[in-house]
Amino acid sequence: MGLAKASRHIELLDEAATLALGADLTTQFDSGVVYLRGDLGAGKTTLVRGYLRALGYGGSVKSPTYTLVEPYEIDGLSIAHLDLYRVTDPVELEFIGLEDVLRDVSLTFIEWPERGEGYLPTADLVIDLEIRRDGRVARFVLL
Amino acid sequence: MRVLGVETSCDETGIAVYDTTEGIVGQHIYSQVELHAKYGGVVPELASRDHIRKTLPLIGQTIADSDLSMNDLDGVAYTAGPGLTPALLVGATLARALAWSLDVPAIAVHHMEAHLLATLLSPSKPQFPFISLLVSGGHTMLVKATDFGEYEILGESLDDAAGEAFDKTAKLLDLGYPGGPEIARLAQQGTPGVFTFPRPMTDRPGLDFSFSGLKTAVQSAVKERSDLTEQTRADIAFALEDAIVSTLYIKCRRALEAHDIHQLVLAGGVAANQKLRERMNDLNADVHYPPIALCTDNGAMIAYAGHERLIRGMSTDLVIDCRARWSIEAINRTGSI
């Protein structure tokens, strides 16, 4: 399938390339759990923005760092965009009621999944984004 | 008339009582130490998002500290959104059940309207119409308030909030959290002009914001220098604070001019930034700030907003409802959510 081809390194020279990669993902992945790993500014939210834009979502795609979860409903598809950057202990996810948040959600993007270890649904796809001197590199790990 | 306010939309559990004649008569925001003993030594971090266990004891404590009893309440207001649904539901369920048991009205409050109205609790309060800049870790939003309950969003951040930009770039500079005060402190030693960062979206019309790119700009600046001296970090901090302050200033000026309004309200944690306050003095407008304690999430603003709704006859039907997404423009003036 398409993702096998995508499992090599993908060079992302600028923001537009990250948006395009997110858009490409819509043709290959429409349900399940995606972990997005990478440092601050690596383009995790930008990739999600590319994905949602490609589905025709016209609103703003804000960073969920503060809100922890940004929910989207697009053409009957329920998508959750999580960001665990501010989570200091994975058990907080239980207090947050993550299970309730993700009930009825068909596609979940999770930024900083390492901060929720043990309390998250397992990933179907992991995307690593690495900052290089001249852009970004994305790596896909299909599980 | 006395209204209890319950805020549980995100991180903080905030409780307060507002009285028509006396103003805020009691308030508590859960802090790590305050109720620590009540949990028998639970590690504070573990309780930091635990609204379920915090809300009820905090209500009891606020009522007691105000020398009131539950029967003195004429209404119970709660944050109904926007926010994290399970967190909102804790406050909504408790508040509604309490109101029902006391046989008083419950009032659903919009979190952002409460922030906006908190300025009316300061001694020098603005008159409608005014422009409000809500600027915090989670929000950067310009709102035109023409009357109570009449709001128009003029612009907002399309990605990261201004406070988030401070926090994340502070992290890139190995500074502590929250980032705003740390950047401001370091910037005092900075030299103007060594670095220049973009003022995002100021070169085109419109009142939206975008601060996400500043992360990459700071990252590049950090990587350019092989030796990141204290002075270089200070120079970066200076340029960063200058970029954020200038961007906010330009957008506020544009909003005031476009709507021919001469009153500006600054709310949210970033409104505490000294350089921002100095810069805003250049505007052809009266600038108002809520009391510092009411800039971040708190129960007092919910109690006050609830009180203002209640005296206008707006209470909420007997259903428990919360909204994760809720535009401030969609507030129903009749009070139902």
Image (cartoon, rainbow, N blue to C red):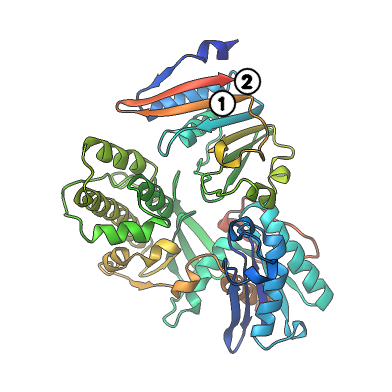
Q: What residue type is labelled 2?
A: Leu
Pinpoint residue B109: horizontal percent, then vertical percent. Answer: 64, 65
Residue B17 in the image: x percent, y percent?
64, 79
Residue B312 numbered mark, or none: none
Q: Name above or below for residue B237 compared with residue B72.
A: above
B166 lies left or right of A36: left
On residue A126, the disc is 1
**Can you tell which quarter of the image residue B298 is in?**
bottom right
Pointer 1 or 2: first along the chain:
1
Q: Can residue B335 be seen in this view?
A: no
Report if the CB atoms under discs 1 and 2 are less than 8 Å apart: yes
Residue B32 visible, this orientation: yes
* C-alpha span from label 1 to label 2: 8 Å
The 10 Å Cα crowd at callout 2, few under 14, some 14 to 19, many 20 or more, is few
Residue depicted at x 29% and y 47%:
B199
* Picture residue at 28% right of the left edge, 37% below the top: B220
Q: Which residue is drawn at 58% across and 67% down?
A: B149
Q: Where is residue A116 in the image (x, y as percent from the top left)?
A: 60, 41
Which quarter shows the N terminus of chain B? bottom right
Find disc 2 in the rendering and name its residue.
A143
Q: Which chain carries label 1?
A: A
